[in-house]
Image (cartoon, grey):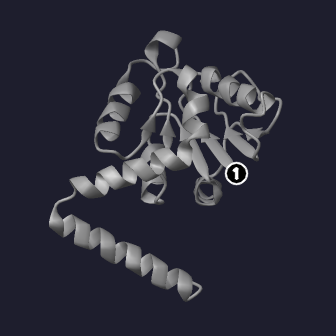
Amino acid sequence: MIFVTVGTHEQPFDRLVKAIDQLIEKEIIQEDVFIQRGYSLYKPRLCESAEFISFSEMRTRIEEARIVVTHGGGSVMLIIHAGKVPIVVPRLKKFDEHVDNNQFYFAKKLEEKAKIIAIYDLEEIEEKIGNYDRLVRELRKYAILEMDPKEKISHFIRALESICLKLAGK
């Protein structure tokens, strides 16, 4: 499942919502999609959507999704905290999607730290969604190589704890 969230900012983010609908139409995306579309004027024709969802539903959808596509706002950190690598499409001022380009600069910083897959031009969305699993593997390898030894040990312990919990059925 792919979960897309555009957040709660009052300006529409039709550009992203339309792009996802078009990928479904072209059968590039062949799995279920749910879009939290906020104040977007465009309503997707080919998948489920809602203007807004509760925080609880947001967390559940993030956990259940194979891919999470988001704007460059606060939800990015929630997705990263859930152990996912989000595809981030920042809202841009030039498209009247935001009052400034803060999401662009935020995405650039997180991209430098290998925390997200960023899309600054929606022409890239097909490639990034189509190659998501490979891109995530590459990011995680890079992130581990860049860690200092103490971080690597901590990362290993968290991964081992996660495996143990799964094996224990928790």
- Residue 85 x, y percent position in the rendering: 47, 49
Left or right of residue 73, residue 9 in this image: right
Is residue 14 visible to us here?
Answer: yes
Q: Does residue 73 appear in this view? A: no
Please name whichever residue, 110 or 30, is drawn nearer the observer in this view of the structure: 30
Q: Quadrant of the C terminus?
A: bottom right
Q: Is residue 108 left or right of residue 3?
A: left
Residue 133 at x, y percent in the picture: 54, 49
Counting other residues with Cα less than 10 Å from the Cα at mark 1, is it few (<14), some (14-19), or many (20 or more)? some
Q: Residue at x 78, y 33 (%)?
A: 27
Q: Residue drawn 45% across and 24% down?
A: 120
Q: Residue lying farthest bottom?
A: 168
Q: Residue at x 56, y 41 (%)?
A: 131
Numbered circles on residues, count? 1
Q: State the image quarter where residue 100 is shown.
A: top left
The quarter holding residue 148 reads bottom left
**Residue drawn at (54%, 81%) of the image:** 166
Q: Is residue 152 above or below residue 38?
A: below
Residue 44 sits above or below residue 47 on the image: above
48 and 41: which one is in front? 48
Q: Amino acid at mark 1?
A: Met
Quarter holding residue 155: bottom left
Looking at the image, which is closer to me, 93 or 22? 22
Q: In the rendered view, tell whether residue 88 sits above or below residue 121.
A: below
| SS state under label 1 | loop
**131 or 44: nearer the eye?**
131
Q: Write down the residue under mark 1.
A: 1
Residue 128 locus on image (x, y percent): 54, 35
Q: Is residue 132 left or right of residue 39?
A: left
In the image, residue 11 lies at what x, y percent? 56, 22
Q: Residue furthest top?
A: 94
